[in-house]
Image (cartoon, coloured by chain):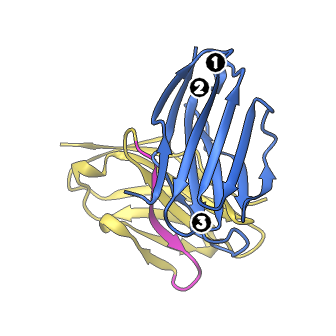
C-alpha cells in the first residue's frame, strides 16, 4: 500500500472510445502528477497539479485531459487515443513541488492498451 | 535543465554478489537525487534520497548510494544481491519540484 491508489489497473480501449483513469492519494499531499512510462523510453512527466492548479503541462497532446477537483483526486480523461499511447500511466503525489528535494510517491499504475 | 544518465540498461549478478548500478547527473545547482525501484507490474518505490545532509545515503532493503561531486555520480550499491532484488532501478533528479528520470537499469540476479 503506497498511499496512492490508481484505478483501473488495466484498461483496453478502442481509438474512438472515451475513458478515464482515476487516482486518489491518502497522504495529505498538496501536489499530484501524471507520468507516462512506455517501453524503452524514460518516464515522461505529463502534468503537475499543485493545490488543484495545473502548474505544468509537458507538451502533452490534447487527447489527454487532466482534471484535479481537489488535492486528493486526479483524473486523466482519454479521448481518441492512438496505439502509440499504450503505456503504463503512473500517478504520484508529493507535499510541495516548490520545496527542493520534495519526495514523490507513486501509485501502482494503470496499464493502458489502445487497440 | 537537470538530467541523469544511467550506464547499462541491463546488469546481471549472481546471488550474493555485489550490486553496482551507475548513475551520473548533470546539474547547475546542488542536486537532490533519488533512486527508485520498480518490481514487475508495480509502480515506483523510493529506495533512498540524497539531500546534501550526508554523502553516503542508506536506503531500504540494504541498498546505499554515495554522492560524489567530483565525479558527478550517485551510484547505487548493495553488498550482497538477493533474488528478490531483481527489478528495474531508476535514478532521478529533482527538477523544479518534479522528477526527471534516467532510462532505468534492469537488474537480474542469477541463482
Q: Position of residue A60 (x, y in %)?
A: 78, 38
Output the letter for the chain in blue.
A
Q: Is residue A6 left or right of residue A15?
A: left
Residue to which mark 1 is pinned? A83
At horizontal 69% and vertical 15% (from top left) the residue drawn is A16
Letter of the chain that mark 3 sits on in the rendering: A
Q: What whole-number distance in Å separates the C-alpha atoms at marks 1 and 3?
A: 31 Å
Circle 3 packing at 10 Å, graded few (<14), some (14-19), many (20+), is many
In the rendered image of the structure, the colour used to display chain B is: yellow
Circle 2 packing at 10 Å, graded few (<14), some (14-19), many (20+), is many
The secondary element bearing badge 1 is classed as helix
The magenta region covers B42-54
Mark positioned earlier in the residue sequence (2 or 3): 2
Circle 1 packing at 10 Å, graded few (<14), some (14-19), many (20+), is some
Q: Position of residue B11 (x, y in %)?
A: 40, 44
Q: Quadrant of the N terminus of chain A?
A: bottom left
At horizontal 30% and vertical 52% (from top left) the residue drawn is B85
At horizontal 72% and vertical 65% (from top left) the residue drawn is A51
Q: Nearer the viewer, residue A73 or B55?
A: A73
Residue to which mark 3 is pinned? A94
Q: Are marks 2 and 3 on the same chain?
A: yes
The secondary element bearing badge 2 is classed as loop
Residue to which mark 2 is pinned? A86
Amino acid at each position: 500500500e503506497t498511499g496512492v491508489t490508481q484505478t483501473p489497473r488495466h484498461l483496453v480501449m478502442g481509438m474512438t472510445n472515451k475513458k478515464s483513469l482515476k487516482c486518489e492519494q491518502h497522504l495529505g499531499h498538496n501536489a499530484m502528477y501524471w507520468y507516462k512510462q512506455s517501453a524503452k523510453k524514460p518516464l515522461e512527466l505529463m502534468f503537475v497539479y499543485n493545490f488543484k492548479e495545473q502548474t505544468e503541462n509537458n507538451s502533452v497532446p490534447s487527447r489527454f485531459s487532466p482534471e484535479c477537483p481537489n488535492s486528493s483526486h486526479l483524473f486523466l480523461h482519454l479521448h481518441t487515443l492512438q496505439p502509440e499511447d499504450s503505456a503504463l500511466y503512473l500517478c504520484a503525489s508529493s507535499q510541495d513541488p516548490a520545496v527542493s528535494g520534495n519526495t514523490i510517491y507513486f501509485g501502482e499504475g494503470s496499464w493502458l492498451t489502445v487497440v | 535543465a537537470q538530467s541523469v544518465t544511467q550506464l547499462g540498461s541491463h546488469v546481471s549478478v549472481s546471488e550474493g554478489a555485489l550490486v553496482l548500478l551507475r548513475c551520473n547527473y548533470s546539474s547547475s545547482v546542488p542536486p537532490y537525487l533519488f533512486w527508485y525501484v520498480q518490481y514487475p507490474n508495480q509502480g515506483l518505490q523510493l529506495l533512498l534520497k540524497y539531500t546534501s545532509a550526508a554523502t553516503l545515503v542508506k536506503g531500504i532493503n540494504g541498498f546505499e548510494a554515495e554522492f560524489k561531486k567530483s565525479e558527478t555520480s550517485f551510484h547505487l550499491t548493495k553488498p550482497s544481491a538477493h533474488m528478490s532484488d531483481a527489478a528495474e532501478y531508476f535514478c532521478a533528479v529533482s527538477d523544479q519540484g518534479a522528477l526527471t528520470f534516467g532510462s532505468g537499469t534492469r537488474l537480474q540476479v542469477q541463482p
